[in-house]
């Protein structure tokens, strides 16, 4: 039996910020958790300290809900996990979902959400053509399409991760997603652990080019201090 390769760590998100192509927007959202141990909640997820963490305190799945006040463009989700420190508390299977609210969330998967929608529509259209003229079939076809969409979902599998995990929030054309809500669901932990640890979560939006003209990217700390008007 072969041992799965460990999940390789991604780059430090601060390197992304220094390119000037993205910015972190987690502070613009309202955060909530399905459960947490006192003193190990949202504040610890967002304090820029890799030594602190959120610890759940309930049954799986463990949820992080991130809700924006307006529809927001999101490009990348970054999660920090540390198997060396957290062991059985470390997530092994994660689902990332986006939508307008809790009732219409859809999983992000490799290949994008747009591809799922198109395939679902094709099946629905083909079913309607095959059943044209029959009453009562419309509802059945809608249910078939929903099952078809869900069957294309894919969770993120992690093997002893120690570092940043980058999750693209893009469609199959690599375009950023526009959403009101992001939900991160921990479906399983290493060694069948019950509760989970996450140490940091960051959300990035692309930085739009100026309509006045294109300027050189600010790549040094000194330049970045003066790139925006306060």
Image: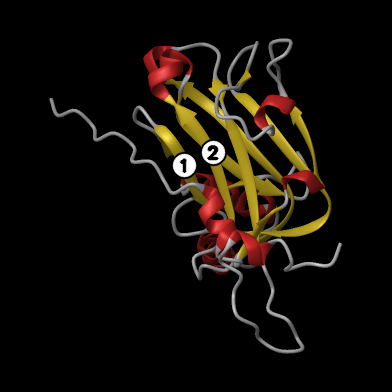
Q: Secondary structure at mark 1?
A: strand
Q: Residues within 10 Å of mark 2 (few under 14, many from 20)?
A: many
Q: Earlier in the sequence, mark 2 or mark 1?
A: 2
Q: Is residue 93 above or below residue 224?
A: above
Q: Looking at this view, is 169 or 15 the one in front?
A: 15
Q: Is residue 58 above or below residue 83?
A: above
Residue 103 in view here: yes
Tell me the residue that label 1 is attached to.
165
In the drawing, does residue 188 fall left or right of residue 143?
left
Q: Is the C terminus in the top left, top right, bottom left or bottom right quadrant?
A: bottom right
Give the Cα distance between marks 2 and 1.
5 Å
Q: Is residue 45 left or right of residue 93?
A: right
Tag of residue 79: 2
> 168 or 151, which lies in front?
168
Q: Residue at x 24, y 35 (%)?
A: 5
Q: Secondary structure at mark 2?
A: strand
- Left or right: where does residue 22 sit relative to residue 174? right
Residue 167 in the image: above or below residue 63: below
Question: In what quadrant of the picture does the N terminus appear?
Answer: top left
Residue furthest bottom as drawn: 213
């Amino acid at each position: 039996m072969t041992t799965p390769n460990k999940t390789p760590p991604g780059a430090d998100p601060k390197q992304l910020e220094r390119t000037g192509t993205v910015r972190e927007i987690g502070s613009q959202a309202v955060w909530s958790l399905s459960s947490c141990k006192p003193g190990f909640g949202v504040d610890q997820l967002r304090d820029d300290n890799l030594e602190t963490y959120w610890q759940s305190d309930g049954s799986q799945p463990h949820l992080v809900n991130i809700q924006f006040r307006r529809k927001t463009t999101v490009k990348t989700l970054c999660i920090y996990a540390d198997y060396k420190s957290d062991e059985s508390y470390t997530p092994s299977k994660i689902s990332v979902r986006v939508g307008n609210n809790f009732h219409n969330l859809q999983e992000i998967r490799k290949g994008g959400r747009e591809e799922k929608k198109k395939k679902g529509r094709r099946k629905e259209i083909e079913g309607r053509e095959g059943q044209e003229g029959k009453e009562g079939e419309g509802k059945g076809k809608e249910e078939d399409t929903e099952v078809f969409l869900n069957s294309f979902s894919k969770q993120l599998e992690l093997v002893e991760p120690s570092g940043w995990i980058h999750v693209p929030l893009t469609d199959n054309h690599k375009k950023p997603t526009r959403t009101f809500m992001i939900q991160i669901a921990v479906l399983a932990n290493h060694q069948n652990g019950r509760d989970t640890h996450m140490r940091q979560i960051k959300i990035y939006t692309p930085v739009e080019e100026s309509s006045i003209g294109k300027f050189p990217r600010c790549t040094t700390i000194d330049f970045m201090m003066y790139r925006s008007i306060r």
